[in-house]
Amino acid sequence: MTPPPASTLDDDDSRPARRVGIDWPRLTLWLGLIALAGPAVWNGFAIVFFDTGGYIRRVLDGSLEAGRSVFYGLFLYASSAGWLSFWGPVLVQCAATLWLIHLCLRAHAIGPAGWPPQARAGAMALLLSALTGIAWYSSQLMPDIWMPLLVLSLWLLGFKGYTLSVRERAGVALIALFSLLSHMSGMALAIGLVTATAAARLLAPRLGWKIQPRVLPPFAIVAASLILMPLTHLALVGHAGYTPGGSFFLYGRLVQDGLAQRYLADHCPKDGSPAPYKLCALQSRMPTDANAFLWHEDSPLNDIGGWKGAEPELAALVKATILAYPGTFLTTALQATGEQLLTIGSGDGLTEWHYMTRRVFDRMLPTQQDLEFNAARQQREEISPTLFTALNRVHVPAGYLSMIGLLLVVGWGLRQGRHDLAALALFVALSLLGNAFINGALSNPHDRYQSRMIWLATLVVIMAAVAWWERRLPGNPDRIPRRAHVANVL
């Protein structure tokens, strides 16, 4: 074989021109990931909360504590490579969030025509990070971000499983299972959402909705978590049970509403006879604020055994108080649910001192982590309330508009045959209501509880807005003439 002339091998003009440009889809995806980790990047360390130290101590102490999941503590240990770097948990949380957003967009075929899936997911993450507090949760060493991820996972498994590969279904199922094990409120929420999925399976054919709910996958995940948690606790700490603490938080709400004080005043003996409860002797010191009762050092809670010994008495008092004043309890529960539904500001508790978490990093973790932790802006008190006041000028209105938008999406989806988006909007609305009840009525309203979930509403509204816009584009077979569109809206 005769080799080609040397000039042919060396002549660059004989080869196709090589385009050098930016890979926009991949760049957009990375920008979305960076946006989700943005608060931690700016802070110089993962964002922490009061309870962060409690989750870490569950692994260090090998014990259970009220409201502090040992499973999330193990996640922090594993993803930080044995406390080597807390950028690991941040990366995992941000990646899981971005992946579920991608799967949700793909399952509903949402995104501008010609945009690759990576670009769609990255752009959505950028929008959500700008409009909501999502990044403050994906960047935080707390299980809060896993609550909305639980909702998306149950939706994908129950309504869009046929759009996922076997590996994707397994990954989504693992996220759902871990979310359930990370926080007890997730279990209560999931039971409600599985019930909603079962109702959708029964009603969808009768209503003519073009959706295909499957109850078994989400039901199996919830059932597995209910079995796995006590068995794993038995293996790890020698005690079979669920993460404790429910009676503490519910009694705290009774304190907040004044029902706890009222019951003690009505039922504690006044003639010197033996009191049925230890708190009877401490009525004069009962605070009127749930946080003061649960967390302050001078709280009477500490006199009756604290977080380790007071649960039997508080459980009995919760039951007795509710039975004594059922009407008042129901009224205050509904009020607390409504208050929680509208309490959605970002930054709740992030500007405070976090004594226990500081103590854990200073005394119990490797020196390098202590140095990095204390060098962060948050520990130097450079994350101020002023920052969140500015952010909430965007986040709070966006959250309220998104909740209203869910109702509009339901109506639009039903009229335009996008039953999948209408059902998703209803699913998210139910999750927001359920979350507000679980955390407001059964605990106490805080911004953190609802703001960690509100971005789901914003996600659905943006998805519907993109779908609406695409239906109006020329060349779309589902395009609606402008006049017809206006008539449908009106």
Image: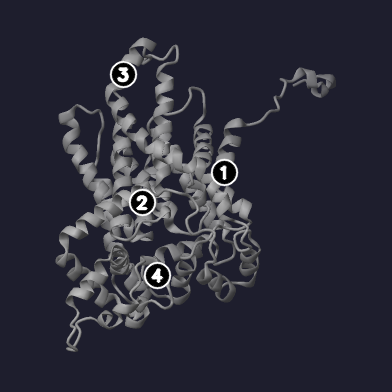
Name the residue: 32% across, 78% down: 284
Numbered disc 3: secondary structure: loop
Secondary-structure class at tag 1:
helix
Mark 3 or mark 2, earlier in chain: 2
Residue 395 in percent (x, y) is at 48, 42
Instruction: Measure how far apart labels 4 and 3 are at the Cα level.
Output: 51 Å
* Amino acid tagged 2: Ala
Q: Does residue 137 lie above or below 277 as drawn?
A: above
Q: Earlier in the sequence, mark 4 or mark 2?
A: 2
> Residue flagged by tag 1: what amino acid is it?
Ala
Residue 292 badge: 4
Disc nearer the start of the sequence (4/3): 4
User: For mark 1, what is the residue?
Assistant: 35
- Are the residues tagged 1 and 2 within 8 Å (C-beta)? no
Q: Which mark is residue 490?
A: 3
- Give me the residue at 39% from left, 54% from top: 449
Q: CA distance from mark 4 to mark 2?
A: 34 Å
Picture mark count: 4
Give the residue type that dot 3 points to: Leu
Q: Nearer the viewer, residue 442 or 97?
A: 442
Q: Residues within 10 Å of mark 2 (few under 14, many from 20)?
A: many
